[in-house]
Image (cartoon, grey):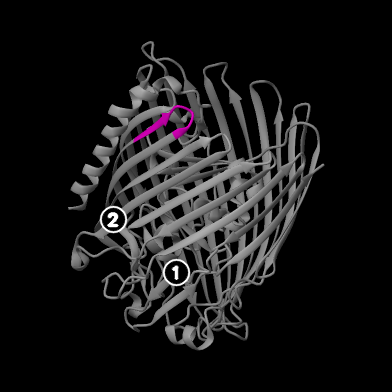
Amino acid sequence: MFCNKAAAVFLFSLAVVLIFFVPVYAAEVDLEKIVVTPYRYEQEISNVGSSVTVISGWQLQDFGASNFVDVLNSVPGVVVHDLYGNGAKASVDLRGFGDMERMNTLVLVDGRRVNEVDLSGVDWKQIPLDQVEKVEISRGGNSVLYGENAVSGVINIITKKGSGKPKLELGAEIGSYDHNLQKLIFSGSQDKLAYLFNGSRESTHGYRNNSFFKAYDYGAKLEYEFTEQLSAYFNSGFHRGTYGMPGGLSEADINNFGRRYSKYGDDRATDKDYYFMLGAKNELAGFGQLSLDASYRIKDVNSNLVGGNGGWNPIRLSKIDTLGLTPKVTINHPVLGRDNNLILGFDFYRDFYRSDNLSSTNVLADVTRISKESRGAYFQDEFFIFKDLSALGGFRYQSVRYAFNYHDFSGWYSDIDEKTQPDEKAYNFGLNYRYWDNSNIFFNLNQSFRFPATDEFFTGTLNTGLKPQVSHDLELGVRHNFGDRLHLEISGYRMKIDDELFTDPTAAGGLGATSNYDQTIHQGVDTGFNLKIIDALSFYGNYSYQDATFLKSHLGGKKIPWVPSHKAGLGLKFNFFKDFAISVTESYVGSQYRINDVENVLPKIKGYFLTGLGLIYKHDSLTLSANINNLFNGHYYEYATYGAFSGNKLYYPAPGRSFGLKCDYKF
């Protein structure tokens, strides 16, 4: 039923765009061409045959957001779930994967994978807004080029590099819940060397008790051009963060103690994260480009869940080492007299995960050691059949080898020393027709995959029977510019997934564990527009409908929990008195079944509206801004869970109305 309705709506909208508007507005097109990199090389967005949204650096400032995830809330089809309300443990969902969203969306920073090898997810607070050049959000599977995790989409974050004369930028922020931030950025270029160094400190007490967050971040970015053809770069970063974990609240807790109460006042964690990345690229005399990137990352996490674990071995010391090597060659050379872009590459990653659990008296209880080694080879070819019509096809083969070692000092669980080596394939095919400058219609189909995370195999015992998850995707869409005033995009998709890796709340004696669900369907429509009413007044809007359903097994016909069917956003920006701008945003996230309610037995958590207000002043080297989030102090939840055996219903209250002030000055 949904598929027929969605197809009808999509095709009707597409017909309206192509039949009525294209002839009328064709003569007015003069927009600047947008260049994106979803193919792992630069390409005009009108030549890209998939759904892509681009947010530039100056747009990030205009949002007045304090967290990176706040910006993503404005993107069509993107749903943000912030566990503690401070941005540190947030997750981003594309195309309806619910609680497993963090494992199905790949996040890159300057080409470096930042997804964890375990279930802990991306630490979004390590991505400072002021250093972002642009963000590319590619919706839909792309495992051919990026391998595992790129099932629902890829978020590619490209940071700034130094240029021009030496510049020093100082900034400070203050806001509600004792939020404060201080930052320093020094950047510039000298002859063939570009450099950027940054440091920041941030802290907040948080909306809820024990939802504090405190972090220090340092980074460096260097790039050197040896010749016009050969260049090299070096990036590094260090992050140290400490945060509280207030836990979920029952209805009785909220009624008796309020929304800001913390059930676990002493639960907290500290993490340290180091990374180094270096690479070189060589232009092949107009023939293409050869590049080699290497990265190394160490992440240490020390957590104490004295309340959340009920005192049972509450201390966990974990460490993840990740080594990556990703050589690739891009060949831009005509074939049969037609433009052709071919990319070939090999991705190698080696992860070593170690975890020690200790009692409250620091007695070692058990140790876990897991190594994961991944090798993937791929190619993709983009062939222009005609000047404005291109065909795309690619293939990847990837194998992963896991080695598991576990010892329980109490003897309750048996020792584990096992290995497993799954592999999987990905492919894609697509057509893209650019019927006018910056306007195109596209079609693509692909197969993508993800392998289980390291801790998905463990529930006290080892389950090496978990299979890789495989998705089969179909997408059709159009991007059209109505002159230089109005941009419209619409896309429809259907993803059929075999062996979807999702939490089974009844497994492991009711504690929950990851299982393969036979078959699921994810389908929907994403729409968006940007309208410049006059030069000083702009307006944007988007709406997404998504349906995520279990197809087979005893859950056939049930909805995947924590996936809203409806999500929408509106925004207005007005520039006045030359140096001032005011913005108003409104977002809506629809109702959804709570996490673990796979049987859909409980009423849905209600949807919510959020209103934001921002004021920006820019003059020469000075930028001042003020913002209000959740203007009307709405009560809502971005996380809510259900215990299938216990029947416990827990809520994670999101922040109420908050205020923020920012000041930046460049010397």
What is the x, y in percent for residue 622? 76, 45
Res 145 → quadrant: top left
* Nearer to me, 421 or 166: 166
> In the displayed structure, would residue 267 be above or below residue 531?
below
Label 2 packing within 10 angstroms: few (<14), some (14-19), many (20+): many
* Nearer to me, 511 or 31: 31
Q: Which residue is outermost to the top?
A: 337
Residue 222 falls inside the magenta stretch: no
Residue 483 falls inside the magenta stretch: yes
Res 27 → quadrant: top left
Res 375 → quadrant: top left
Q: Amino acid at mark 1?
A: Tyr
* Nearer to me, 270 or 182: 182
Lateral position of residue 586 relative to residue 517, left or right: right
Q: Which mark is residue 639?
A: 1
Q: Main secondary structure of the magenta part?
A: strand
Residue at 47% over, 80% down: 249
Residue at 30% over, 49% down: 524
Secondary structure type for disc 1:
strand
| Mark 2 or mark 1: whose residue is earlier in sequence | 2
> In the displayed structure, would residue 574 be above or below residue 193?
below
